[in-house]
Image (cartoon, rainbow, N blue to C red):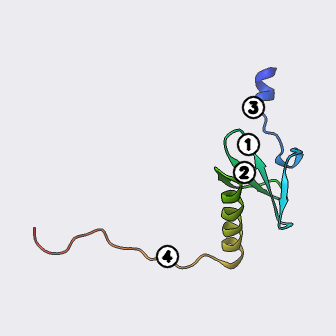
Amino acid sequence: MDSIKKMTKRNPLDIQDKKLIDECFYVVKGKFLWDSYDKEGNGLVSALTEESCISGTRFYLKGRQEGWPETKSYSGEVGGKL
């Protein structure tokens, strides 16, 4: 029975030490990492520090809202004879 309790995930919204940032998402200190969650409890970003978790989550949410910039791809081929 104890193994079943360990396997169930806890709801991040039930954690008492969470911080609401920008009225938009929560950050929570885990054992080793900081994690961010949206208001529905969906995981967003994990980081080593609270500051990097907050800035990474802001960047992620901005990209999700406004769209991501076009990426460029480069060829890995070398031209010419060897």
- On the image, the x and y values in percent for residue 27 come to 78, 54
Camera-near label (4 vs 1) is 1
Residue type at tag 2: Asp
Residue type at tag 4: Thr
- Identify the disc placed on residue 71: 4
Residues marked 2 and 1 touching at CB (< 8 Å): yes
Residues marked 3 and 1 touching at CB (< 8 Å): no
Residue occupied by mark 1: 30
Q: Is residue 19 above or below residue 16?
A: below
How far is the residue under mark 3 from the one under mark 4? Answer: 39 Å
Residue occupied by mark 2: 35
How far is the residue under mark 4 from the one under mark 2? Answer: 27 Å
Mark closer to the chain start, 2 or 1: 1
**Disc 1, SS:** loop
Q: How many marks?
A: 4
Crowding around mark 3 (Cα neighbors within 10 Å: few <14, some 14 to 19, many 20+) is: few
Residue occupied by mark 3: 7
Residues marked 4 and 1 touching at CB (< 8 Å): no
- Left/right placement of residue 62 relative to residue 28 reads left
Crowding around mark 4 (Cα neighbors within 10 Å: few <14, some 14 to 19, many 20+) is: few
